[in-house]
Amino acid sequence: MSSSFLLPRRDFLAVGASALAARHLRWPARTTRPVPSADQLQWHRDELALFAHFGVNTFTDREWGEGTESPTIFNPTALDARQWTRAAKAAGFKMVILTAKHHDGFCLWPTATTAHSVKSSPFRGGTGDVVREVADACRADGLRLGLYLSPWDRNAAVYGSDGYHDFYLTQLRELLTRYGRVDEVWFDGANGEGPNGKKQIYDWPRYWAEVKRLQPQAVIFSDAGPDIRWIGNEAGTAGETNWSMVDPRVVSAPGVSGEGVTRMLQQGDPNGSVWRPGETDTSIRPGWFYHPADDAKVRSVDNLVDIYVSSVGRNSKLLLNVPPTRDGLLHETDVARLAGMRRALDARFGASLAVASERRSGEASGTTGRLEYMLPTPRSVGWATLQEPIQHGQHVAAWRIEGLAGDGSWSPIARGTTIGHKRIVALPRGTRYGIRLVIEQALAPVNAVSMVLHAEA
Ligand code: FUL
């Protein structure tokens, strides 16, 4: 049962009979607090994206290539990007983000900038283009496409000099003009030495402006946004407190580190001046690239559900890496785990418990309120999914859930801070006659917060 409480708003009550005006004023965009762009909202609602780390490392069994690998080792003889996208789609993923180039500099598309690419490989006789195959497969299966272009390049001779900016921008332009619509561009923060032993100073504003010019709808990911921030670890866990806003001065550029930085990435900032929600990237295997020795170390279905709860269930988005094998296919174990994850998520969260009655109440200020459900028969409730309408900003700062006992008394059974797009709460076992959500504090009026109850697993 899904419902929401509506808090009385003075301006709403004063509007009168015009349905149009009422609809408009019911969700006043009058807050000065940040709100998401339409593209950020879409990103958030997608909830799940599949990351595909693929390249020369797949063939050398490494995580970070040296940049000296021969392109002739890249030969995925059975590559079938539709096999990836079908598995992703069936598991409820909405996007695939491909490593078009990792730190080794090997390009998965026939770039004009370097010979260090698929063009010099035996893949499809040197005429292949992995980016195109993945882009086409995404389109065929209705998935969005994202691309990762590592700024760190251990092969490019110009790396570590001013000449690299044009080299990198040309690569970006190729990727953003040849393959149709791109919805996310992923900039990782790793920055080591290039072939001449020098590190590069990146011109982030220029790179990001080029993305916005060529694909204005694409959200840009990096530690420092500008649209989407890193969540601060690769373990699959967002902060229990997780605001979609940040103070941009704390994480000024990709790759900066420090305690304050990690806290800002994990938790955001209730008074942050920009909307920059956190993306949780982690791998289904111990490494980012495929290694045969890891075939028995693929995350279990239970573990995948756990990281869904600790990412999507904490106002983040899960970017789950499922690395293709040397054949160019997702491994059958990984595909089976993805399908198992979907079945388990549907079984746990797909259905909501019916409630016998529902009562809403709130204060005139709109910053506290209650949503109370009576259960048709006393039972233990396993989970609650809370949501706030983030198109109007993220405001809830403290909540608790209370259970009703047989003697008519309510007592707290869970509490937390933020809600955002989605907050999934595990409830302790116990017979409840009713369940209620109490919003204790919000930083601006919240018109509607919803709660859905789920049975125990
Ligand atoms: C990091 C890289 O160094 C890893 O290899 C991986 O690509 C990860 C997603 O981002 O910055």
Image (cartoon, grey):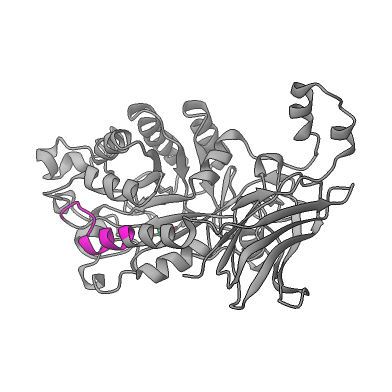
- The residue nearer to you, when weighing 53 against 170, is 53
Residue 293 place in picture, x, y as percent:
22, 73
Left or right of 294: which side holds 78? Answer: left
- The residue nearer to you, when weighing 254 against 153, is 254
Q: Quadrant of residue 6?
A: top right
Query: Is 351 drawn above or below residue 95 in the view shown?
Result: below
- The residue nearer to you, when weighing 74 against 359, is 359
Residue 146 place in picture, x, y as percent:
41, 41
Q: Residue at x 77, y 52 (%)?
A: 360
Q: What is the magenta range?
A: 327-339
- The residue nearer to you, when weighing 343 against 213, is 343
Indicate yes or no whether the magenta region holds residue 456: no
Residue 400 place in picture, x, y as percent:
73, 66
> How many numbered marks have been drawn onto this rendered protein structure?
0
Query: Is 198 drawn above or below residue 456 in the view shown?
Result: above
Figure quadrant, ligand 1: bottom left
Residue 338 place in picture, x, y as percent:
33, 59
Left or right of 179: which side holds 403? Answer: right
Query: Is 174 drawn above or below residue 247 in the view shown?
Result: above
Taking the image as drawn, is residue 250 in sight?
no
Q: Residue at x 47, y 52 (%)?
A: 188
Q: Residue at x 35, y 70 (%)?
A: 300
Our reading of the magenta stretch's main secondary structure is helix
Q: Residue at x 32, y 64 (%)?
A: 63
